[in-house]
Image (cartoon, grey):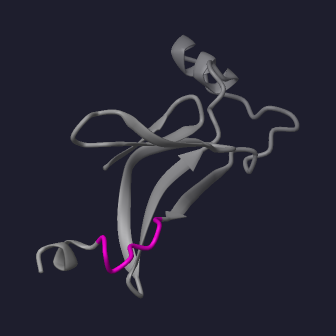
């Protein structure tokens, strides 16, 4: 499986053999970057970093592009942007579907 986040706030899983989407989940924040996997007590998890979309052309960007120093915006809250790690537990495998059991 390949896991990927897309700019439409969706985290998706694709079958590596067929390339077909097999799962998707809408998130309250945009999934960004590569997903990571880890295991706790035999259970596998997938985690991805996510953040709220940035505003385009903020006042500070306009000031930098014009060569001027950016002035703080009145009422601007530095904590407005949301960021998170979003984790999903993969379904547990039964003994009949694990690779070691199939080879016996």
Q: Say whether residue 30 is left or right of residue 22.
A: right
Task: Examine the image and state in which quarter residue 17 appears.
Answer: top left
Point out the image quarter for the C terminus: bottom left
* Count of marks overlaid on the render: 0
Instruction: Report x, y in % for residue 69.
Output: 61, 26
Residue at 69% over, 22% down:
59
Is 41 placed above or below 19 here?
A: below
- Asked if residue 9 is among those painted magenta in the image, a careful observer would answer no
Instruction: Report x, y in % for residue 62.
Output: 61, 16
Is 54 placed above or below 17 here?
A: above
Residue at 56% over, 58% down:
86
Q: Say whether residue 80 is left or right of residue 90.
A: right
Q: Residue furthest bottom?
A: 41
Residue at 81% over, 38% down:
76
Q: What is the span of residues highlighted in magenta in the rendered image?
A: 90-97
Of residue 98 and residue 38, the one placed in the foreground of this image is: 98
Give the prevailing secondary structure in the magenta stretch.
loop
Of residue 47 and residue 12, the one placed in the foreground of this image is: 12
Of residue 84 and residue 46, the one placed in the foreground of this image is: 46
Q: Residue furthest right?
A: 75
Instruction: Report x, y in % for residue 42.
Output: 38, 83
Q: Residue furthest top?
A: 66
Instruction: Report x, y in % for residue 74.
Output: 86, 34
Residue at 41% over, 88% down:
41
């Amino acid at each position: 499986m390949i896991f990927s986040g897309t700019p439409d706030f969706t985290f998706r899983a694709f079958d590596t053999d067929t390339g077909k989407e097999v799962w998707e989940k809408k998130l309250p924040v945009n999934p960004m970057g590569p997903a990571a996997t880890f295991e706790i007590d035999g259970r596998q998890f997938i985690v991805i970093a996510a953040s709220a979309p940035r505003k385009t052309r903020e006042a500070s960007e306009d000031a930098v592009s014009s060569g001027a120093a950016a002035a703080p915006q009145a009422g601007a809250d530095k904590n407005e942007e949301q960021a998170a790690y979003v984790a999903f537990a993969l379904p547990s495998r039964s003994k009949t579907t694990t690779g070691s059991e199939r080879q016996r």
